[in-house]
Amino acid sequence: MKKILFLLMLPLLAMAGPKETVKIKTSAICEMCKERIEKNLALTKGVAKSDLNLDDKVITVEFDAAKIDAAGIKKVISESGYDADDVKAVAKDYAKLPNCCKKKVE
Amino acid sequence: MYKLLLFLSFSSLLQAQKAIQKDSIERETELKEFRVIANPGQKDDNAVLATEIMTIKTLGKAACCNLSESFETNASVSVSYADAVTGSKQIQLLGLAGNYVQTNVENIPSIRGLKSTYGLNYLPGTWIKSIDLAKGTISVVNGYESMAGAINVELAKPDTSEVYYLNTYTNSQGRFEVNQQGAHRFNSRLSTGVFTHYSQQAARLDGNGDGFLDLPLFNLINVLNRWKYATDRWMIQWGLNYLYEDRLGGQNGIESNSDRYKIYGFGSKTERVETFAKVARLFPDKPYQGLALIVSTANHANDSYFSMKKYKGQEQSIYGNFIFQSIIDNTNHTWKAGASFLMDSYQESYLDSAYSRTEVVPGIYGEYTWTIPNKLTMVLGQRVDFHNQLGTQWVPRLHMKWDVAPDWIVRLSAGKGWRRVNPLAENMGFLINNRALTLVGDLNPLEVSWNYGITLTKNMNIGSRKANLVLDAFQTDFTQQWMVDMEAGSRLRMYAMPGVSYSTSIQGEFNYSPFKRFEIKAAYRYQDVQADYLHDGGLIRLSKPYLNKDRVLVNLAYATPYEIWKYDLTWQWNGSRRIPDHKLSHLHTGAIQEVSAPPFSTVYAQVTRQFKKWELYLGVENLFNFTQKNPIYVAKDPFAPGFDASMVWGPIVGTMVYTGIRYKIN
């Protein structure tokens, strides 16, 4: 019974204070990239919502300023293997991306 | 252990150098995951055989420990304890025992011979990448032993596995488990993986108070090291698997082997070493052509006692299969041909008798596939095997897939299968009673059956959401079978099938995703399994015991966006089933009222929370705490006539809560 209560309580922990919004330009290419970045952000503490627009590659992130800031969010994106504004993708993580998510060689 | 640590630190040093080649295989696996999401119910619409695919995603729904626990959300396969003492689990498909299901690991025959006693418990869940399940006979390329169906398990591959993976599991019944896996890529061609498993049943559990442990205490160590070398032209894989298991069960007070004359004890020690190698030659300019050689060896040793009764078994096995594949004119006509070789040497002893035999089975086969693209695929296979003891056996098989309409698929299958019985290893659970084992008449260990099946698949949209419906019917007719007869209360008789023996199975399954990330599966299965038994000098037709005619399975799965939370609920309802009358004087006659076990439900539920690098899961099995009240007859006096732990029809243990983590370093 205790365990069931514990489970019911867990989602409540996700609730928090005032939200801020930031827009970040990424190097995402396809649906798979969008899924990957949004998922990694969703798993990040303080991020409430994110939506990547594949037309202009800009991701809109809603977050709790008490828990994370824009730099932290960019770090998560770069660790997912993508550029975030001026922060370049982490090479090691970029290497792990599936082929379709890698930038074409110009 | 030290070696593994060394290996892991070594691999992290080299991690920076890791080449940029999460290539097509990686993409393929990701695409597969996408396909699964798009296709509720996980049926492979391209396969000629109706194939159910269980991916990591499905398997994760019930955090399973080993292969025997991987079918909780599957409607076709039932899993049950073989008896109330050994803890051995057996599957059942189309109303037939797991012995009639050919169980392969990466297309190498795996759970057969002496391994069939506990084989399903011996494949750790975390090693499993996917499970393919086909009903009826399968391609002749894989041999002659698929009679009721076939299972092929794909394990994690060294080149696509995580650098490090840790899984733990603990449950309220005192079982815990640690799985560690490490993989390393040396360069674009060579990779290796080390998979380790350790599990233990540490607590003595006697929920029903009958003085017997509900589950045996056990220690299981299982280690696999596998290698892969892949280029455009060659794909070579090889590996070594070592397994050791120690079981101790029986009455509560049992401490060791020496107690077994005073109180009822069961002990079993198993040691097994397997090796395998697979070599495939590819032709980049002729993608339709291929050459493959599969070789495997196994050495199995088991030492058991069932109180006074002692059993010892050893098996050495060598298997080889050579396959060539090409086309006639164009890819609408493809063919495969090859030769296989099996040598199985057994040395067994039970009570004061010793049995040994060596089977040598060379075989040849050919298979032709005719394809009319998007309309019809037909596979016609023939194989002939030359068994040194059972003679020449011919196996014809036919599979057909007809795309009736864009959303309608009809599949037909017909074919023969055969196998050689291992009477002791396959019926180990039946030795845990005080019945007198009687072998009646001239016993031929050959079993032969014909299987016919039809499967209809309908894909549809309900509103804008996908759904599918699968209906199938399979008939298995034995022409030769080894019968195990428990109908006479004081005896366990084995004899050659004296009359008819058949199984009819009909199943309907509906999969539907009413909204995003929510999936429903509902299935109903009907089985009619009957055979003639020897009775009073004549024959009597009875339904096979322990099998329920009706079964319902409902599975609900919901995930929050990005699968951060995953919820899963499975409800199984099993109808009533006939059980042999256990009264000592009893001999079944048509006039006597049949004894049957009541219907029962079991519910499984699980919640998984995903974090960035790891996952936490918490689940419950047998939520309504249903158990068979007296799984052991005359449990208070195990040395008296009537003692019987082999009459199991339902769950032995009640509600169980489990939890664990999965941690990954990519």
Image (cartoon, coloured by chain):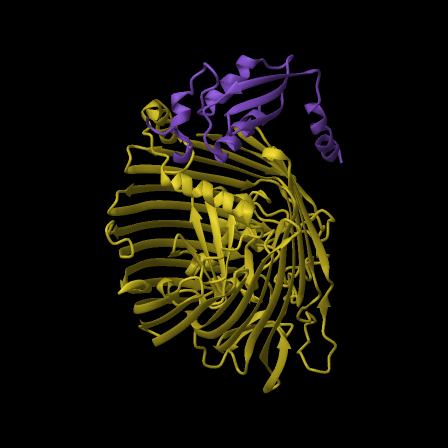
Chain colours: A purple, B yellow
Q: At which x and y percent is residue B501?
A: 55, 77
Taking B25 as reference, is A47 left or right?
A: right
Q: At which x and y percent is residue A76?
A: 51, 20
Question: What residue is at 43 percent from the left and 49 percent from the top?
Answer: B154
Looking at the rendered image, the quarter that the N terminus of chain B falls into is top left
In this view, B516 is above or below B637: above
Q: Nearer the viewer, residue B274 or A5?
A: A5
Question: What residue is at 42 percent from the left and 20 percent from the top?
Answer: A90
Taking the view exactly as shown, the residue that stands out farthest to the front is: A55
Looking at the rendered image, the quarter that the C terminus of chain B falls into is top left
Question: What residue is at 67 percent from the left and 50 percent from the top?
Answer: B653
Q: Residue B298 sits in which quadrant?
A: bottom left
Q: At which x and y percent is residue B288?
A: 29, 56
Q: At which x and y percent is residue B576?
A: 71, 65
Q: Nearer the viewer, residue B584 or B663?
A: B663
Taking the image as drawn, is residue B651 in sight? no
Taking B96 as reference, is B222 left or right?
A: left
Taking the image as drawn, is residue B600 in sight? yes
In this view, B9 is above or below B293: above
How many numbered marks are there? 0
Taking B235 as reference, is A12 left or right?
A: right
Q: Nearer the viewer, residue A27 or B534?
A: A27
Taking B473 as reference, is B652 left or right?
A: right
